[in-house]
Amino acid sequence: MQKIIKELVKEQVKVQVSKILPKIEQTVNEQLEAEFLTRPSNSSNTSYTVAADLSEMELKKILIEKMEGNKSIHRSNEQRNLYKALVEAYESNKIILDIYGDTVTLKRHRDDDADKDEEPSVGPDRGSKRRGEG
């Protein structure tokens, strides 16, 4: 019975997250871009690298704290609703992590990470070259 409930909760979380994730990602990107544009150029590259390496959970937590800190959740109903959805998604992810532990990874994989390990392709001018004798 408990396993069925866990599966139902898991499915509902997936459904809810898939509904709100695009808006959350847009909001997070806007916040990061705003932060990126207001920092001095020498530290902005480092900040971008750090943000890219943060997990989705950490980014959600940071965004929640920023929204609470600058009172942006009180500006409009849309922002309040986005805040509530973000908190719900964060709490749902937290529940999943508590239930499943290390078996669930919420960190997003970037396509550019997959390309790092690939060997450079060998062109027609490369390969076996004969040394000139003599």
Image (spheres, rainbow, N blue to C red):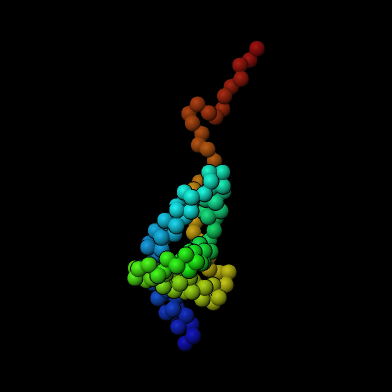
Instruction: Report whether residue 114 is seen.
Output: no
Q: Which residue is at the front of the view, 32 or 113?
A: 32
**Residue 45 on image: x %, y %:** 54, 46
47 lies above or below 55 = above
Say which residue appears at 45% left-offset and 83% top-offset. 5
**Residue 51 on image: x %, y %:** 53, 55
Residue farthest bottom in this picture = 1
Say which residue appears at 65% left-offset and 12% top-offset. 134
Q: Which residue is at the front of the view, 107 or 28?
A: 28
> Taking 51 as reference, is 76 left or right?
left
Say which residue appears at 56% left-offset and 43% top-offset. 42
The picture quadrant where one finds residue 88 is bottom left
Say which residue appears at 52% left-offset and 49% top-offset. 39
Instruction: Report whether residue 28 is seen.
Output: yes
> Taking 16 as reference, is 105 left or right?
right
Marks counted in the figure total 0
107 lies above or below 74 = above
Q: Which residue is at the front of the view, 108 or 84?
A: 84
**Residue 15 on image: x %, y %:** 38, 71
116 lies above or below 58 = above
Residue farthest left in this picture = 77
Q: Which residue is at the front of the view, 49 or 17?
A: 49
Residue farthest top in this picture = 134
**Residue 110 on image: x %, y %:** 48, 53
